[in-house]
Amino acid sequence: MKRSYTISFGVGRLALLAIVLLTSSCEAFLDVQPKESISDQATIVDKISAETALNGVYSALGSGGYYGTIFQSIGYLSGDNVQWTGSQSQVQEFINHRVSPENSTIAGAWVAIYNTINRANNVIAKVPQVTDPALTASIKNSIVGEALAVRGLAYFDLARTFGGVPIILAPTISPSDNRGIVRATQQQTFEQALADFNAAEQLLPETTDRYRITRNTVWALKSRYHLYQKEYRLAEELATKLISNPDFGLLSSYGAFFQNDVRGTRESVFEIYYNGTTEVNNHRNQWQPQSNGGTRQWAPNTQISSLLTTPSTGGNRNALIKVDAQDRIYGDLYYRQPGSDPSYIFRIAEAYLIRAEARARQGNLTGGCEDLNAIRTRSGLSPIESASQESLLLSIEEERRLEFAFEADRWFDLVRSERAAEVLGITESFRFLMPIPVDQLMADESLVQNPGY
């Protein structure tokens, strides 16, 4: 999937901030720079420009501020798997669970996600109006459907990170556009995500593409949505659609989905492609040690390292970590030079664990064990024979922690299951949501801060 693009778009809500610049030095780890928005005037006029605009949507989704690094770092650093080895105090705020509204990481993620929404809005608004004969109805539907699904994912991520946010469904042309829109509730924001997923589902083909969104991708994202909403029957049904599809399947060993430079395996439902030249995934710079040209500013902490390297808990998932010449453990999910590792948005393993949890919460303990054991067996672990509902749910939680150790799910899993206070020792419940970035509050007086901040 090539994501280079030439069409300029407005940068979304409050276009006084620009995309985050990620550098390898800890002093400049996250630096938000000002930038004016660029007006988008009738740039989508034919099939080629429509496809180019959609490439721009995917480019924003995979940008350094979104799934390219910054947004995912919120999940990494806020959970209990990763330690920060640098010195920047704003990054340590996530480890300490005391994130301030001035934090540049949340500012960068906010801007990048709204930039993605704005590009999607341009496609959704303009492509249906194009009359180019080469842009057939099926191609047009696919382009709009993909943009809708990306927008749905963006609102889902905003909802689980910040709570309720302003819902913007029209393109932003100038910095003053779309100001004054009050925040929706968190539930309304989640519902917007579902509305976009449902609309996309009707437009997309039921094909398999690891790098572009199809109806299968939407089913994956909806299964995750319904799990968050505690709508377990629907989560189970959608996960089953994926598990029963022969195009997807667990590989024989955990590391087979990412080792040896592979990408787009049967394990992958949706991942973001980077070519390593014009499109670079910055994750490896933060994970790899200095001897490999990285900074190792993110590293597995002692607890997750022990779990991954203990055969009875980690199995063959010890493939996730290595030891450098100084006997320091580092994460090896992202290792390709100069940065062509995929960012994994949804793997089939998640469908199994979604269904396992959904079944367990509905009282189907046998079915829940079967799905959990599919993951455990692939990881070289012995199966769980039987369990109470409580113990099975804890086993599924632990399996998710290890299966997605460096895929930024841990924090969000603990918050949605209401176990973040117990597991992480957070005594102030308002910190389960990130604060609204102070720059956004200053730029638009209609925005109000999350309670407690």
Image: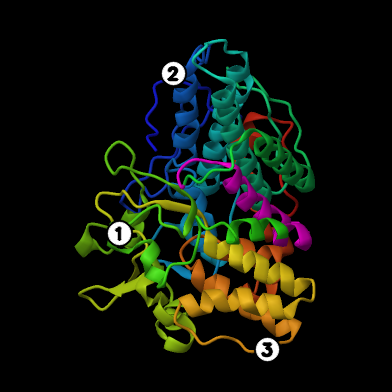
Indicate whether residue 218 is drawn in magenta.
Answer: yes
**Do the residues under discs 3 and 1 have CB atoms within 8 angstroms?**
no
For residue 171, above or below residue 382: above
Residue 26 on the magenta segment: no
Residue 98 appears anywhere in the view? no
Query: Vertically, is 412 above or below 81?
Result: above
Which residue carries the number 1 mark?
A: 335
Which residue, given by chain and number where applicable, does mark 3 sit on?
Answer: 386
| Disc 2 from disc 3: Cα separation | 56 Å
Disc 2 crowd, CA 10 A, few/some/many (<14, 14-19, 20+)? few
Q: CA distance from mark 2 to mark 1?
A: 34 Å
The residue singled out by tag 2 in the image is 48
Magenta-highlighted residues = 210-236
Q: Residue 211 at x, y = what percent?
A: 45, 44
Instruction: Kindly indicate the quadrant of the structure image that contains residue 334.
Output: bottom left
Q: Position of residue 72 (x, y in %)?
A: 50, 53
Front residue of 337/263: it is 263
Q: Residue at x 34, y 39 (%)?
A: 279
Tell me the CA gap for discs 3 and 1. 38 Å
| Amino acid at pointer 2 | Ile
Q: SS of the residue at dot 1?
A: loop
Please say whether residue 382 is visible from this viewpoint: yes
Above-or-below relation of 272 to 385: above
Dominant secondary structure of the residues highlighted in magenta in the image: helix
Q: Earlier in the sequence, mark 2 or mark 1?
A: 2
